[in-house]
Image: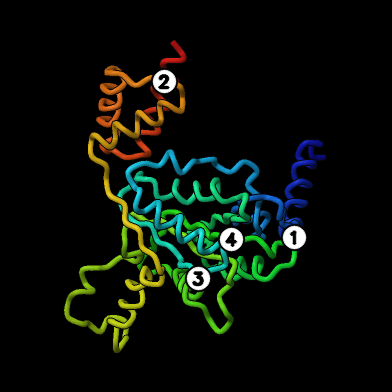
Amino acid sequence: MEPLENLIKRAENLISKLENLLPAQNFPVDWQAKAWRWVKINGKSQLLAVQNPHQISLNNIHFVDQQKAEIVRNTRQFLAGLPANNVLLTGARGTGKSSLIKALLTKFAAQDLRLIEVEKHDLVQLPEIVALIKNRAENASLKFIIFCDDLTFEAKDESYKALKVVLDGSVSAIADNMLVYATSNRKNLMPEMMADNLATKDTDGEIRPSDTIEEKTALAERFGLWLSFYAFDQDEYLAICKSWLATFDIAWDEAASRAALSFTHTRGARSGRVAYQFARDYAGKLNLK
């Protein structure tokens, strides 16, 4: 006779397999939340409320004043029920692209702005998300930003087509209570191959391969508003470090300046993200002492 532990283990494995065969449970959406993530739980994709959204102030995002003004204006139009555009934020890493979108939620949550974060690999399910938030009585006053961070696609990635449909609209009208705000480190969201610029070759039997290339590289053009971000110089980087240290009640002095510059040597970059990481590291070390 098998030991009792083995029998229990086999029973648990059997139960687990049976659970996977059962239809996934539909959990009600918490419409009282201010932000959600589109996640898969037990094989079922759904909106999961973010209990403590990242609180970032627009005042803590520096040296992107023009970009900040443009996206705030576009968001105000959206909240006022006026025409507004989907937004693509592109450029150098760590310059505040994602933080700027999160700061919009902090700024406008009281005016019924809401945020839904969708990973790139889940974009194929965008029509399902749109169906959830379009014309619902329980959230009629809410305006939703679909937030896609670090948006780039591989050459054979087909999920960009679902995004294109949402940006352009299909037979059904685009939901008037949602916009797509996306960030990317490159302006061309689809990779361009050297072979694309060579003479046409009949490799896959396609008569007009240039049409497919154009469809992919023109994805960014579906966004009505483009905002470009550039790497910071040394003075800008130090100013951001000083600002972040102030949020930790740490005075800026020559020692802090030297430490901030030294910190960049280990990271190989000067950016808002690196400045924030330096401030946390430096403030933590001083308080530990």
Query: Which quadrant of the rendered structure holds the C terminus?
Result: top left
All told, the count of numbered labels is: 4
Dot label at residue 83: 3
Q: Give the side of residue 187 with respect to residue 181, left or right.
A: left
Specify the quadrant of the image occupied by residue 208. Answer: bottom left
Looking at the image, tell me whether mark 4 or mark 1 is earlier in sequence order.
Answer: 1
Within 10 Å of disc 3 (Cα), the crowding (few <14, some 14-19, many 20+) is few
Which mark is on residue 144? Answer: 4
Q: Which mark is residue 250?
A: 2
What whole-number distance in Å separates the C-alpha atoms at marks 2 and 3?
44 Å
Q: Residues within 10 Å of mark 4 (few under 14, many from 20)?
A: many
Q: Nearer the viewer, mark 2 or mark 3?
A: 3
| Residue 247: x %, y % from top left | 46, 28
In the image, 39: left or right of 158?
A: right
Give the left or right position of residue 141, taking residue 5 as reference.
Answer: left
Q: Measure how far apart labels 1 and 3 are at the Cα level.
A: 34 Å
Q: Which residue is mark 1?
A: 26
Mark 1 or 2, closer to the camera: 2
Residue type at mark 2 is Ile
Q: Residues within 10 Å of mark 1 (few under 14, many from 20)?
A: few
Q: Residue at x 79, y 42 (%)?
A: 7
Q: Nearer the viewer, residue 67 or 179?
A: 67
Which label lies toward us, 1 or 3? 3
Question: Closer to the N terminus: mark 3 or mark 4?
Answer: 3
Q: Separation of disc 1 and disc 2 at Cα?
A: 48 Å
The tag earlier along the polypeptide, 4 or 2, is 4
